[in-house]
Amino acid sequence: MICYIFVSLCLFTFFSTTDGINCVSCVGWSNSGCNDPFDEATSGDLPVPGNTYCLKVVYPSYVERMAGGRTCTPGGGPGGSTRYCCSDQDYCNGIIRFGASTIVVSLLLIIVLCVSSN
């Protein structure tokens, strides 16, 4: 019984209760870790929850990553920039911090441990 309660609590921690997706927010001209290749350890990024899309803007000399509101139009922008929009997963404008495969493997491990302890 305790095992099932534990599994239920783990499931609740994996699912977000907010609407929208989480995005990385940082600017490469003030922090080189935000540029490509993205370096999570030194980017100084701030996770921004509850967005419709994430945006990555590539300028000639730096990269800017941000959260977006209603719509995003990919392609060329001001100052020779290129806009990349995504809305398919959390942190899609940076790196994936906690992927679905990690969740599945964790859940399977918990279930196997619970079954083997009974």
Image: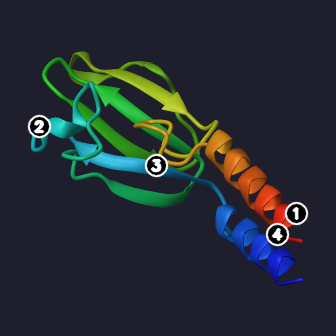
Closer to the chain start, of discs 2 and 3, is 3
Q: On the image, numbered disc 3 is attached to which residue?
A: 23
**As shown in the figure, which amino acid type bears the numbered disc 1?**
Val
Q: Is residue 26 above or below residue 61?
A: below
Mark 2 or 4: the one toward you: 4
Q: Which residue is mark 1?
A: 115
Do tag 4 and tag 1 residues touch (Cβ < 8 Å)? Answer: yes
Q: Does residue 118 appear to the left or right of 29 in the view shown?
A: right
- Which quarter of the rendering shows the N terminus? bottom right
Local secondary structure at mark 2: loop
Q: Quadrant of residue 100?
A: top right
Per the image, the residue denoted by label 4 is 117
- Camera-side residue of 68 and 24: 24
**Crowding near the residue tagged with mark 3, few <14, some 14–19, many ≥20 C-alpha atoms within 10 Å:** many
The quarter holding residue 7 reads: bottom right
Q: Which residue is mark 2?
A: 29
Q: Amino acid at mark 4?
A: Ser
Q: Is residue 22 above or below residue 12?
A: above
Q: Is residue 6 above or below residue 106?
A: below
The residue located at (40%, 57%) in the rendering is 47
Of circles 3 and 4, the one toward us is: 4
Q: Residue at x 13, y 36 (%)?
A: 32
Cα separation between marks 2 and 4:
53 Å
Q: Is residue 76 left or right of residue 28?
A: right
In the rendered image, residue 19, in percent from the top left (x then y), is placed at 67, 62
* Residue 28 shows up from this direction: no
Mark 2 belongs to which amino acid?
A: Trp
